[in-house]
Image: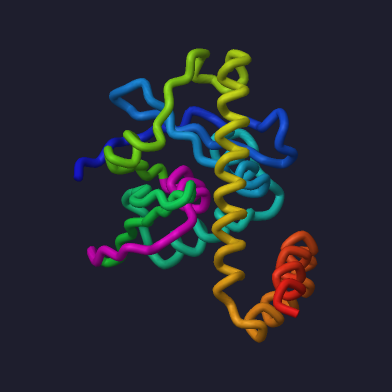
């Protein structure tokens, strides 16, 4: 399968889905865009990396990783978005240390945040771009999207969130009650009450 190089075009904030963002990647030798739904923290981390003048007073998580890697002579050579399943993109980080190459699995938002900090190229496979790539009618700058583009981006964000929710619900259905209770305790400890409510709902169905 042939690789297609991507550039980061920007981050689009959903007008209807509160706290949801779409990272917009563009193929280097083409007009298609690859929108990837990301969270607010990841959007902030990517935005800071794009704006060279912004320096947070303390290192963000991805900055800390970069500092750690620099200290131990680890270099990120490239990032590959290699799989798309149920609306979720999967990525690999290709690293090198002492001329030994390693492949590390990563969330796509994290992989891209690190690629920016290491100035590493981002790729995907042609079949993924064929499947998920879109054409936007407006300017490639998210701030200058047409109304149709904004509606399309919101639809993509909503669709991917629904697919992710359905996928997580299916995961809970496959878990035993013991596993669900462990997940529930962890969600409460993490103060993720929205997740805790979903797990509680699944436990209630079993009782």
| Horizontal relation, residue 61 to residue 2: left or right | right
Q: Is any part of residue 5 visible from this angle?
A: yes
In this view, the residue in front, 120 or 155, is 155
User: In x, y percent, where is residue 152?
Assistant: 56, 25
Query: Can you name the residue that lies furthest to the bottom here?
Result: 178
Q: Quadrant of the C terminus?
A: bottom right
| Horizontal relation, residue 124 to residue 116: left or right | left
| Residue 76 belongs to the span the image colors magenta | no
Q: Residue at x 37, y 54 (%)?
A: 76
Magenta segment, which residues? 99-118
| Residue 109 belongs to the span the image colors magenta | yes
| Horizontal relation, residue 190 to residue 110: left or right | right
Q: Which residue is drawn at 54% across and 20% down?
A: 141
In this view, the residue in front, 20 or 122, is 20
User: In x, y percent, where is residue 44?
Assistant: 65, 43
Q: Quadrant of residue 7?
A: top left
Is 45 located above or below residue 196 in the figure?
above
């Amino acid at each position: 399968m042939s690789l297609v190089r991507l550039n980061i075009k920007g981050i689009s904030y959903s007008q209807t889905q509160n706290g949801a963002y779409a990272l917009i990647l563009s193929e280097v030798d083409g007009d298609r865009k690859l929108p990837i739904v990301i969270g607010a923290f990841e959007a902030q981390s990517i935005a800071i990396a794009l704006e060279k003048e912004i320096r947070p007073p303390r290192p963000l998580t991805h900055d800390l990783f970069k500092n750690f890697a620099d200290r131990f002579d680890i270099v990120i050579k490239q990032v590959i978005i290699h799989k798309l399943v149920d609306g979720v993109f999967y990525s690999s980080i290709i690293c090198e240390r002492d001329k030994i190459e390693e492949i590390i699995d990563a969330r796509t938002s994290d992989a891209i945040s690190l690629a920016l900090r290491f100035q590493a190229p981002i790729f995907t496979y042609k079949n993924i771009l064929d499947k998920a790539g879109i054409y936007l009618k407006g300017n490639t700058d998210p701030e200058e999207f047409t109304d149709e583009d904004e509606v399309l981006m919101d639809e993509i964000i909503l669709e991917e969130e629904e697919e992710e929710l359905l996928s997580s619900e299916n995961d809970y259905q496959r878990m035993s009650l013991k596993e669900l209770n462990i997940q529930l305790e962890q969600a409460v400890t993490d103060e993720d009450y929205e997740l805790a409510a979903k797990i509680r709902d699944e436990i209630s169905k079993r009782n």
